[in-house]
Image (spheres, rainbow, N blue to C red):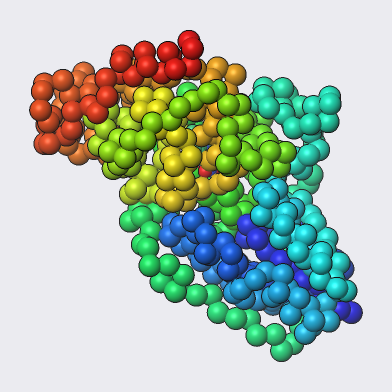
Amino acid sequence: MPTEIVLFTRDLRVHDHPALTAAIAASPSVTPLFVLDREILASRYASANRLALLLDALRDLRGALRRRGGDLVVRRGDVGREVALLAGRLGAERVHVSADVSRYARRRTAGLRGIPGVEVVEHEGLTVVPSGSVTTTTGGAYRVFTPYWRRWQTMEPRRPHPAPDRLTLPDDVDPGVIPELAELTDARPAPGRPPGGEDVGRAAAEAFFAADPDPGDRDRPAVDATSRLSLHLHLGTISPTELAVRADPTSAGQGAFVRQLCWREFHVQLLAAEPRLVVDDLRPRGDRWIDDPDGFEAWIEGRTGYPLVDAGMRQLRTEGWMHNRARMVTASFLTKHLRIDWRPGAWHFMDHLVDGDLAVNFGQWQWVAGTGTDPRPNRMLNPTAQSRRHDPQGAYLRRHVPELADVDDDLVHEPWSGGGPGPDGYPAPIVDHGWARGRFLAARGG
Ligand SMILES: Cc1cc2nc3c(=O)[nH]c(=O)nc-3n(C[C@H](O)[C@H](O)[C@H](O)COP(=O)(O)OP(=O)(O)OC[C@H]3O[C@@H](n4cnc5c(N)ncnc54)[C@H](O)[C@@H]3O)c2cc1C
């Protein structure tokens, strides 16, 4: 019987992997393949943080497949060409792949379909509810979250697939080498970047469910009350279906978590319908963005003089991750206080985020900028008020902005108003909130 090829992409796990299960059911011989894609490696998308996680995940996946009698075949180059070469050499007639929605992923699948004599079978695996299976009454994608969430909840998730016990690789296949990070990039990952891979992802999920944090703490950046599973969901080192099925519906915290999974899928179905989400305003508001390299630099470096903005931007640099509340405040500050275009901001996030994801990152940036799906596009977050409300003791601020370590609780949220630089050289605010608010509302005709 010919071997079945499973092309892994961003579904780097053995548990609940429908494509892998189907291949094993079809033939006693299975060839798991990962291609380090030349096109992705050459793009801005290939940041050091996400490459480091990818390599963690590949090593882990190879270990899991070897323990089951198989291996992960690793190649580097053009995906279509590598699949064609391997299929030709092994006499494979079928390649299994998890369906994905970005323009690039669809082009990749279309390329596979062009390989003569090879059938391409797409499987679920990226989302709990397959993208495109929940549509509006007119058959389109949802652009408002709440009705999508209502429909999404009525869909019964499929049953998670167990990890396979055994699999057999054809003889004489060169498994190939998983490279070191330095072979792929000169850049260094963030010092505090989390580790990746399926084992770590599964352990993190278990820890989250066991801790069962209070949903009221979700918005508090100083508290570790969210799952931190975003990087695993992005690379598929954990299955969203397994998480959704595992979540206890009687726990408020786990219910809130499932709602976040739905937010992710809301953006996935939006990107599927609107590939221009990463490039163009979804809902143009007539914005005239300001070219302000100094403001952009201060924002990147966490030196805007607004403690919550600076704490978030510094957390991004040191951990490759930022708390959701801080992501909202920092993105709002760039687009609404400084009036700098959301595109460079979103790409800066992509350069650093361990979970940087086309659908979610660009969807959320447009949401915050008011050019996307937020039904209240002209809301403007006040960083000082947000800080007082969500980090009342200033613990998050002090953790990431050491200049503020000795500032009183009451003053720590405020931009410095004493003239000149503040404590330990902490900068004075680069823009006045009230003035920026007036400018923004006037620009939006509010
Ligand atoms: C400007 C901006 C950019 C963002 N960029 C990304 C990104 O590139 N990748 C990314 O995964 N998330 C992004 N988010 C969403 C959110 O901030 C992160 O998913 C979350 O902070 C990850 O932490 P967690 O895993 O502990 O989340 P939890 O609260 O535990 O949520 C569980 C999972 O749900 C998903 N999720 C959570 N919040 C959101 C949300 N608002 N929208 C969509 N999905 C969500 C994530 O997959 C997350 O892992 C962005 C948010 C903003 C405001």
One can see residue 48 in this view: yes
Percent coordinates x, y for residue 165 in the rendering: 73, 68
Left or right? Give the position of 100 relative to 181: right
For image coordinates 30% across by 15% down, the residue present is 435
One can see residue 65 in this view: no
For image coordinates 76% across by 76% down, the residue present is 84
Percent coordinates x, y for residue 90 in the rendering: 79, 83
Report the number of numbered marks.
0
Quadrant in which the N terminus is drawn: bottom right
For image coordinates 34% across by 19% down, the residue present is 436
Q: Residue furthest top?
A: 446
Percent coordinates x, y for residue 368 in the rendering: 50, 28
Left or right? Give the position of 150 relative to 414: right
Q: Residue furthest bottom?
A: 172
Quadrant of res 300: top left
For image coordinates 77% across by 85% down, the residue present is 89
Percent coordinates x, y for residue 58 in the rendering: 56, 67
- Looking at the image, residue 357 lies above or below residue 48: above
Left or right? Give the position of 300 relative to 213: left
- Looking at the image, residue 186 lies above or below residue 148: below
